[in-house]
């Protein structure tokens, strides 16, 4: 049931590029795979035995294939093995390979724009159907017969991706240079991730197992003061935690980043109820910030200077006292104002068990520092989409899923940005736009294999009437019903994401049922994806992984 990925380290430039792009994505999507490095071993029918999917991943890999290897690949694909071609330099493949696939009259041209064809198996749950590339990529145009179906076009309606059945197997061919998966051209989290994932799932021989994130959805509200909000246009929306009630009504369990000195006594009872009923989480965001300049921070000064250890001790004692008075505990996932957390603050957080972050910028950096958004966090080195340990201290795990540009002057990552009268961003409330943006932010996070996060700031909520806020949340809820999803709180998602890194699939076999050998450890209920074919439809199920230490052998009937 394994996936095998063909590379050639004898071409070091292209090998490095595939390692930093496609292989990172395979790991992120939980694909159980092994490499076939053509500089060290060769392809044969025996090598491909029991392979459920073969991926030709590296740019120019066709040059490294022999005629015999191409024949064996075609033979095994005809017998049921899935074949996925990410390397679109078709003219470099052996002629017999192209002839077997009925690909003729190949020409090369550049493309700057892609259109995803809706209602194909490769466009399931994709959000963007028109994608502008950052840089032109080379592509092959081919003459195909009716056995092939297109799933991608370019700006001139030239076919850019095709798929078909081949005997008992399935084949997907991207007619693009694999450079499209590099950040300088497009990269991951930019609109093609759903097509990438679907191409794997559709083409693979079934049953097929992956270790992807479950489709979790949560909400994150920053700059929370409730009835103490100094800029509220509609106090009735923010007072008595009303807007949290609306989120709860439609399934959300939000994480609220509190301006802790702004919280009035009249809201404390509501805090306790939400906390103990599991309807909301609360994190110390900052002490207060009436002018939106982070003038009263907890974790680092807004000048970029670190607090002294004595100052940090006092800050955390103030936080501890306040939460103690309220009778609640902070969330394990830290929601820091502007994401500004000093390096010196990390030991204080660790001592309190707050090891998870939702940070879109580097630790020890200011939001407005351009270098703060350059952060080597897993899987892609993009802090706006991050599930991994931070390089500054591997005790901390960062968990972020924020589409949109990270810019404080125009915070596109906030789904209500441009939809309310706050900061004169709109002449009036635009509920239709808010619904569209909110649904997009959630669905893009799911499509990218992270999680859906409805993120906004309380100031924008406070410029909506209660009726307008409910209209927006109700509308978003209706939109996301189109895809499978599971509502969870942020702490649960953080723990689940970290726990995925504790174990790996050691082997997976399909003989009189499915046998899966896992190694590592599991400390909470986890699930593997099981994909099967039922006619033309790919069916998705979940297999439960119990808690274990060292290793476990799981047996499932199909």
Image: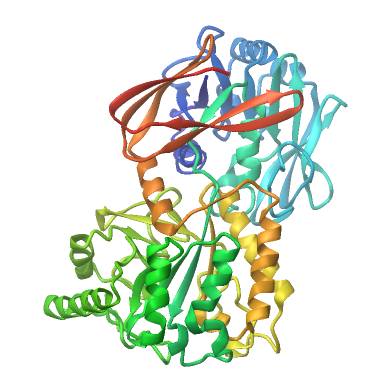
Q: Is residue 518 above or below residue 393?
A: above
Q: Position of residue 263 (x, y in %)?
A: 37, 84
Q: Is residue 146 left or right of residue 513?
A: right
Q: How is the image coloured?
A: rainbow
What residue lies at 37% left-to-right and 56% top-to-bottom?
Answer: 398
Q: Quadrant of residue 165?
A: top right
Q: Is residue 180 above or below residue 291?
A: above
Q: Position of residue 215 (x, y in %)?
A: 55, 47
Q: Is residue 527 left or right of residue 503?
A: right
Count of picture labels? 0
Q: Quadrant of residue 418?
A: bottom right
Q: Position of residue 311 (x, y in %)?
A: 16, 81
Is residue 414 in view from this perspective?
no
Is residue 285 in view from this perspective?
yes
What residue lies at 45% left-to-right and 25% top-to-bottom?
Answer: 35
What residue lies at 32% left-to-right and 39% top-to-bottom?
Answer: 523
Q: Is residue 208 above or below residue 234?
A: above
Q: Nearer the viewer, residue 425 or 224?
A: 224
Q: Is residue 290 left or right of residue 308?
A: right
Q: Quadrant of residue 507?
A: top left
What residue lies at 40% left-to-right and 49% top-to-bottom?
Answer: 378
Instruction: Assign the C terminus to one quadrant of the image.
Output: top right
Q: Residue furthest top?
A: 46
Q: Nearer the viewer, residue 152 or 425?
A: 425
Q: Position of residue 265 (x, y in %)?
A: 36, 86
Q: Nearer the viewer, residue 210 or 351?
A: 351
Q: Residue furthest left?
A: 310
């Amino acid at each position: 049931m394994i996936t095998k990925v063909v590379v050639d380290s004898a071409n070091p430039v292209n090998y490095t590029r595939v390692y930093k792009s496609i292989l990172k994505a395979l790991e992120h999507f939980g694909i159980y795979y092994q490499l076939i490095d053509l500089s060290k071993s060769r392809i044969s029918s025996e090598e491909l035995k029991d392979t459920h999917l073969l991926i030709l991943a590296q740019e120019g890999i066709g040059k490294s294939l022999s005629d015999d290897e191409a024949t064996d690949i075609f033979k095994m694909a005809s017998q049921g093995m899935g074949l996925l071609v990410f390397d679109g330099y078709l003219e470099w493949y052996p002629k017999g390979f192209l002839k077997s696939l009925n690909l003729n009259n190949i020409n090369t041209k550049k493309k700057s724009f892609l259109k995803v064809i809706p209602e194909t198996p490769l466009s399931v749950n994709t959000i963007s159907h028109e994608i502008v590339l950052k840089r032109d990529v080379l592509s092959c145009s081919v003459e195909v017969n009716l056995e092939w179906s297109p799933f991608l076009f370019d700006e001139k309606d030239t076919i850019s991706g095709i798929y078909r059945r081949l005997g008992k197997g399935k084949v997907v061919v991207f007619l693009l240079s694999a450079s499209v998966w590099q950040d300088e051209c497009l990269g991951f989290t930019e609109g093609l991730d759903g097509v990438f994932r679907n191409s794997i799932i559709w083409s693979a021989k079934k049953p097929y197992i992956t270790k992807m994130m479950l489709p979790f959805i949560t909400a994150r509200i920053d700059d929370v003061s409730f009835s103490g909000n100094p800029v509220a246009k509609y106090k009735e929306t923010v007072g008595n935690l009303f807007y949290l009630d609306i989120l709860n009504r439609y399934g959300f369990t939000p994480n609220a980043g509190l301006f802790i000195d702004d919280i009035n006594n009249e809201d404390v009872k509501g805090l306790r109820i939400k906390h103990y009923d599991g309807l909301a989480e609360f994190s110390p965001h900052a002490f207060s910030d009436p002018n939106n300049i982070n003038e009263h921070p907890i974790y680092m000064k807004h000048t970029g200077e670190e607090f002294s250890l004595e100052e940090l001790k006092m800050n955390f004692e103030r936080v501890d006292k306040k939460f103690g008075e309220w009778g609640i505990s902070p969330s394990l996932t830290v929601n820091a104002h502007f994401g500004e957390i000093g390096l010196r603050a990390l030991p204080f957080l660790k001592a309190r068990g707050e090891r998870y972050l939702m940070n879109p910028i580097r630790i020890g950096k200011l939001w407005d520092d351009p270098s703060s958004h350059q952060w080597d966090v897993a899987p892609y080195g993009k802090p706006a989409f991050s599930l991994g340990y931070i390089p500054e201290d591997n005790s901390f795990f960062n968990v972020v899923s924020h589409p949109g540009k990270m810019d404080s002057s125009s915070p596109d990552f906030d789904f209500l940005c441009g939809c309310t009268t706050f900061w004169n961003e709109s002449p009036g409330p635009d509920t239709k736009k808010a619904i569209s943006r909110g649904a997009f932010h959630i669905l893009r996070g799911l499509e990218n294999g992270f999680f859906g996060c409805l993120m906004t700031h309380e100031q924008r909520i406070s410029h909506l009437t209660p009726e307008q806020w409910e209209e927006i949340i109700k509308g978003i809820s209706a939109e996301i019903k189109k895809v499978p999803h599971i509502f969870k709180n942020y702490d649960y998602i953080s723990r689940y994401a970290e726990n995925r890194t504790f174990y790996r699939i050691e082997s997976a076999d399909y003989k009189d049922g499915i046998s899966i050998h896992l190694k590592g450890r599991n400390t909470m209920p986890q699930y593997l994806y099981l994909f099967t074919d039922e006619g033309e439809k790919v069916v998705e199920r979940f297999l439960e992984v119990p808690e274990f230490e060292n290793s476990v052998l799981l047996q499932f009937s199909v």
